[in-house]
Image (cartoon, rainbow, N blue to C red):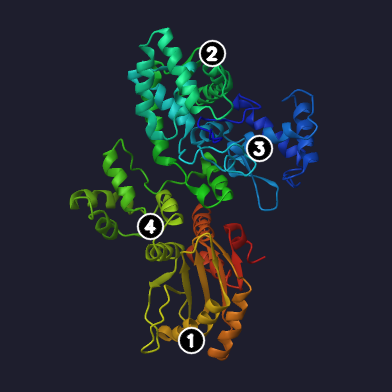
Amino acid sequence: MSNERKVWFITRPERDPKFHENALRSLQTATNNFSEKWSGERAMHKRYEEVLANDGLKRENISNDGSGGRTWAAMLRTFSYVYIDHTGKLKPTKVGLALLSGKNVRENIAKQILTLQIPNAYFLDKGFRPKFKPDFQIRPARFLIRLVNQKELDFYITKEEIVFFALTARQDIDLLSVTKMIKQFRELDMLAKEEIKKQIATEFEHRERSDKAARDFAAAHGDVAHTFMLLCDYTELVDYIRGDALRVPAEKQNNTAQKLSELDARYPFSKRYLISPERFAEHAGLDVGSYKASSYGSITPATNSAKSLRMVQQLLADYPLIQTKSEEEISNILMRKLTERESLKFATLLANPKYSALNEDFVESYLNEENDRVFEDKTAEVLKAIGFEVELRPKSVQEKVQTQIEILIHIDEDNICILDAKMYRPKFPLSAHLASHMGSEYLPNYQGYQGKNISSFGYITVSDWSGERNLLKITEKARVTIPGSNIHGALITANALLGFLDYCLDNEIPVEERKRLFMSCFNNKGYRTVIEILRSED
């Protein structure tokens, strides 16, 4: 039996979300305003339990190993109120800080419920076991609310139906199939229903099975269903009839549908967990006052054909920042599959400079790229989005030389940087041979390109890297091949590069400052995460 989770899960030391704020305040107290290390510190975990008990949030029994404190912190991490930073401390996100300052508390908690997704930063943490199956891509609360708000289901869904059908959905697009199964289930007699429930329990339970499969499954996952019902009720888009069902009364149905449409436009499913847990948590933890429009702005399936919009997203998945493209450029890309008229319509809506957000579709496209040349092209697009003038595969200044670098960026009027994109998995080793090649051929062959000096070089790797010490050897070799030079390099993973762009966009860092921050990394060091890039000036 696979030990991967096949059904939804939610950490639930406290089921009612109105206590999230109080739990966060207790955590702030226990950690001395988030200044104490959390990771691996069992005394701190027990301290949090003590504060929770003193604040009346949990019973006074304190665990021997601090497991209760870790469970409460896990709940707050699940909703991205806090995350664990590179120092092992719990760091509050913007929405966490908003709760602590008492700003728009209800609106912010509702936003975190409605944007909660599987997977997220906490569910991908090495300490979270068992892991969800890798095909999970779902917003549970949003899925449930959309499921309930359907005429086909008479605008209600029972707790039993949530346990056996909704909790087994793995993607948002499973809505139609789950709806169909529930409708069929309602038409069965009691014996047939019991058989269906046994089959589902046998297929989806990741724990040890027993002869009481359906009953055990309902008991094991019923509290999860109850918690999600409470979460959905808190949003006020549905009503939770205790012990019975979720319902959407007639007076709420239109408003709920409209709100769901707005959520889809504003908060698309985030792939930032592929960049890093920190970037995911920081973005997922934006408060309602820090709303960042998605790459697709106000375009929604309600105003455009859903199929056409999916095709637009597929065609633009190779570009990290759509709004850097002109209407003509976007239109030309879309005309590969759409008509000229439809391409122009979407291009007009998308070429809007007020929207500046990382294209979610690009994240997965870039980080999972398998083609060497396409990886180079996409890396160039990230560098362009940062703000650089970029040239792909430029010709060497030396005549009759076959050596060609993949990427060249213009730093300013006097300096350039050359970059080699590497598709090695699971790790790119910067060997002595490759270092010699960079120092003796690449660098001298591009020195003087368009009258500019090479001031830096680097390697962008699709995954991990090794051989950092050889960067200094390249610098030393270049001093021989380019007398008087002092050229420094960097090793940067694609995750770190993309995370840097995402950080700059979220924090509205001006283009020139982005470029300066990025170039400060070229100090003969390697970077695996965006945090390391941002600390390069320290």
Residue 319's mark?
4
Residue 100's mark?
3
Which of disc 3 and disc 1 is earlier in sequence? 3
Amino acid type assigned to the residue bearing label 1 in the image: Pro
Q: Is residue 106 visible?
A: yes
The residue mark sitting in front, 1 or 3, is 1
Mark 2 highlights which residue? 242
Which of disc 4 and disc 2 is earlier in sequence? 2
The residue mark sitting in front, 3 or 2, is 2
Q: Is residue 406 above or below residue 40?
A: below
- Tell me if 531 is positioned left or right of 320 in this view: right
Q: Are marks 1 and 2 in contact (CB under 8 Å)?
A: no
Percent from the top left, x then y, of residue 71?
68, 33
Amino acid type assigned to the residue bearing label 4 in the image: Tyr
Residue toward you, 195 or 421: 195
- Give the image quarter of residue 185: top left
Residue toward you, 240 or 174: 174
Which of disc 4 and disc 1 is earlier in sequence? 4
Which of disc 2 and disc 3 is earlier in sequence? 3
